[in-house]
Amino acid sequence: MANSEPHDNGSQFFFTLGRADELNNKHTIFGKITGDTVYNMLRLSEVEIGPDERPVNPYKITSTEVLFNPFDDIIPRTTKKLKNEKPVEEVEKAKSKGTKNFSLLSFGEEAEEEEVEVNRVSQSMKGKSKSSHDLLKDDPHLSSVPAIDSEKANESDNSDKEEEEGYYDEDDDLDNEEKNEMKKRVMQKLKKNTDVPVKKITEGEPKQKSSRSP
């Protein structure tokens, strides 16, 4: 690599076909040519040069191949991309927004009218929640009369609730009657067990003698 001062290596480089002791301690050797490529070097040495020792018709190196890399532990340096910098593909996609070409369709006018209607509705719906009647209020097929009267619906709900309550009350009464009958049966059994016959001794009756003699 050619340099003008220490630690200042530029992009200029040159090949040598023999010893060049005058270049020692001035330039850096970073490789050598091997294989059949040496014949290309011999052809380069036959090139006509000018007074500044440069080729009159310079050749171009189209490709190179590294056969042996003694510095395989060196990782190529990658330049950091700026955060605000976007890839070229994303920028192109942002610029070219999709547009609908209604002229290619046989029903282009109808589709365009529907597109305008959808845009108008979407603008009116921003920040609001609306029902289908609000959105399609101009549609003659829709009726503003509710399908079910609210008062009748409330009455039917109340009647259903009353029937359910009555049903549950009847069940409760049956359960209470069964419990009362069970209690009565238990009380009667307890009374029968506690009623033991007891003989009272009257004053006029003589006492029974024991069968044993004195």
Image (cartoon, rainbow, N blue to C red):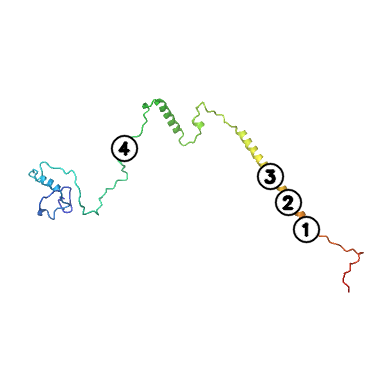
Q: CA distance from mark 3 to mark 1?
A: 34 Å
Quarter assignment of residue 165: top right
Judging depth in this view, the residue of 93 and 33 nearest the camera is 33
Residue 163 image position (x, y, % from top left): 66, 39
User: Which badge, 4 or 2, comes first in the chain's sequence?
Assistant: 4
Q: CA distance from mark 4 to mark 1?
A: 104 Å
Residue that badge 2 annotates: 182
Residue that badge 3 annotates: 171
User: Which badge, 4 or 3, comes first in the chain's sequence?
Assistant: 4
Q: Secondary structure at mark 2?
A: helix
Q: Which mark is residue 193?
A: 1
Judging depth in this view, the residue of 20 and 88 nearest the camera is 20
Q: CA distance from mark 4 to mark 3?
A: 77 Å
Other-residue count near label 1 (Cα within 10 Å), few / some / many at <14 / 14–19 / ≥20: few
Specify the amino acid type for callout 4. Glu
Task: Give yes or no for contact between labels 4 and 3 (Cβ–Cβ under 8 Å).
Answer: no
